Image (cartoon, grey):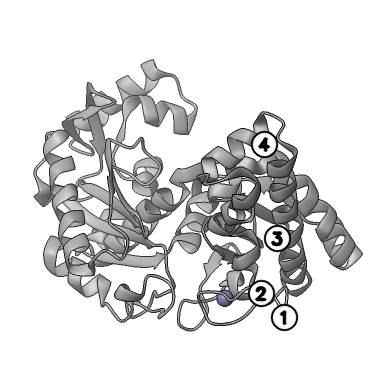
């Protein structure tokens, strides 16, 4: 019962996995509890197969995660924050996409996914949204002139709540990823840590005292605009030599254009895998620069774990070593010795996982019978 209270709806196989009890004992238990009316059983489709979802009365329903990037939109639905993804989809978006249109598309995709799993969209309980831009997680407003400028000032939470008629929780993708890793990844049980999302830009999700720390207006951890080279290239933010201009995936691709021609970031990683010394050097330098910025963060926060996520995760083989060296050279020795560098466990799904957790939190906050449910 405690497991269901914490996780929401689960299949019997998932309950067995979470509790460590055998499938046979779970089956007997669920039958007994169902006879007493203490749990609800609902048919569903999981991994393309029919399955029965077990939940507590008053706690049924679906959670959706929406990740909005500058070039794509990912949507997924689950029955519980730790449960399997029931259905998912990804839609490429035009560069500089229109907020209204993208939000309408996201809402339509959430409805489509419900149809695909054989549930009405009225089963949706709450939505978590990860935005690839700074956001004010308190007001639900997207806020940056330089990152995804068309979204600047958009009241995303309000707009999406009007479309889907359920509570919506918004945060930036690094914070959502940190929340995901905290719940079900390499930050589980970690009191003080940091998730680095290094893709076209770098942002950090800070974990302090076992919780994601957003700062007063949600922009804590925007490490990508720390100055590393005062005479460096101009950054999208208007300053020179920000971390983003040295390790952002587009900057890395740009730095081999002269020698290797037009490459995508994945091509660069593939070439590094085949032994291309130039591509390996670019990735190693990115690790070194990341380490410089992270060493400052380590001196400030004295964290236990730093997680590497985002696009650079696929190049971890060439990035993590130089990053570690750079940290050891620059951070206070005791702080550097007590921090562990780990690759993300959830990979590209970390942000969506965090969305599910945030959605579950906001839905239990809004649920009228949540006090009753705890009995
Ligand atoms: Zn900048």
Mark 1–mark 4 contact, CB under 8 Å?
no
Point out the image quarter for the C terminus. bottom left
C-alpha gap between disc 3 and disc 1: 16 Å
User: N-terminal of the two: label 3 or label 1?
Assistant: 1
C-alpha gap between disc 4 and disc 2: 25 Å
Q: Secondary structure at mark 1?
A: loop
Q: Nearer the viewer, mark 4 or mark 3?
A: 4
Q: Secondary structure at mark 3?
A: helix
Q: Secondary structure at mark 4?
A: helix
Asked if residue 189 shows in the view, the reply is no
**In the depicted structure, whether residue 350 falls above or below residue 50:** below
User: N-terminal of the two: label 4 or label 2?
Assistant: 2
304 vs 39, nearest the viewer: 304
Which residue carries the number 2 mark?
Answer: 241
Is residue 112 toward the left or the right of residue 262 in the image?
left
C-alpha gap between disc 1 and disc 4: 29 Å
User: N-terminal of the two: label 2 or label 1?
Assistant: 1
Which residue carries the number 1 mark?
Answer: 230
Which residue carries the number 3 mark?
Answer: 290
For image coordinates 78% across by 56% down, the residue present is 339
C-alpha gap between disc 3 and disc 2: 13 Å
Point out the image quarter for the N terminus. top left
126 vs 300, nearest the viewer: 300
Mark 3–mark 2 contact, CB under 8 Å?
no
User: N-terminal of the two: label 1 or label 4?
Assistant: 1
Report x, y in % for residue 76. 29, 44
Mark 2–mark 1 contact, CB under 8 Å?
yes
Q: Nearer the viewer, mark 3 or mark 2?
A: 2
For image coordinates 66% across by 42% down, the residue present is 316
Which residue carries the number 4 mark?
Answer: 272
Label 3 CB less than 8 angstroms from ligand 1: no
């Amino acid at each position: 019962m405690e497991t269901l209270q914490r996780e929401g709806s689960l299949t019997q196989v998932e309950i067995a996995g979470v509790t460590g009890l055998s499938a046979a004992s779970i089956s007997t238990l669920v039958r007994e509890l169902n006879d007493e009316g203490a749990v609800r059983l609902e048919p569903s489709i999981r991994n393309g197969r029919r399955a029965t979802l077990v939940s507590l009365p008053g706690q049924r329903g679906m959670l959706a995660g929406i990740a909005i990037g500058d070039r794509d939109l990912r949507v997924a639905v689950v029955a519980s924050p730790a449960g399997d993804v029931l259905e998912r989809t990804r839609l490429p978006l035009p560069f500089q996409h229109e907020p209204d249109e993208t939000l309408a598309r996201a809402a339509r995709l959430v409805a489509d996914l419900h149809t695909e799993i054989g549930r009405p969209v009225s089963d949706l309980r709450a939505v978590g949204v990860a935005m690839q831009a700074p956001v004010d997680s308190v007001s639900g407003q997207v806020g940056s002139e330089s990152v995804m400028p068309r979204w600047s000032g958009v009241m995303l939470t309000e707009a999406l709540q009007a479309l889907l008629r359920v509570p919506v929780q918004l945060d930036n993708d690094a914070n959502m990823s940190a929340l995901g890793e905290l719940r079900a990844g390499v930050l589980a049980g970690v009191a003080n840590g940091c998730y680095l999302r290094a893709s076209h830009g770098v942002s950090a999700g800070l974990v302090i005292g076992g919780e994601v720390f957003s700062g007063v207006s949600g922009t804590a951890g925007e490490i990508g605009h720390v100055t590393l080279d005062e005479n460096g290239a101009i950054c999208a933010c208007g300053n020179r030599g920000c971390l983003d201009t040295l390790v952002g995936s587009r900057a890395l691709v740009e730095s081999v254009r002269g020698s290797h021609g037009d490459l995508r970031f994945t091509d660069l990683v593939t070439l590094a895998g085949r032994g291309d010394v130039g591509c390996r050097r670019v990735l190693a330098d990115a690790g070194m620069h990341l380490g410089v910025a992270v060493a400052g963060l380590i001196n400030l926060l004295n964290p236990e774990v730093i997680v590497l996520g985002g696009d650079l995760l696929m190049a971890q083989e060439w990035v993590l070593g130089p990053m570690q060296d750079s940290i050891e050279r620059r951070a206070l020795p005791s702080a550097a010795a007590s921090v562990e560098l780990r690759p993300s466990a959830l990979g590209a799904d970390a942000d969506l996982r965090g969305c599910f957790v945030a959605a579950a939190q906001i839905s239990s906050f809004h649920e009228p019978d949540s006090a009753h449910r705890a009995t």
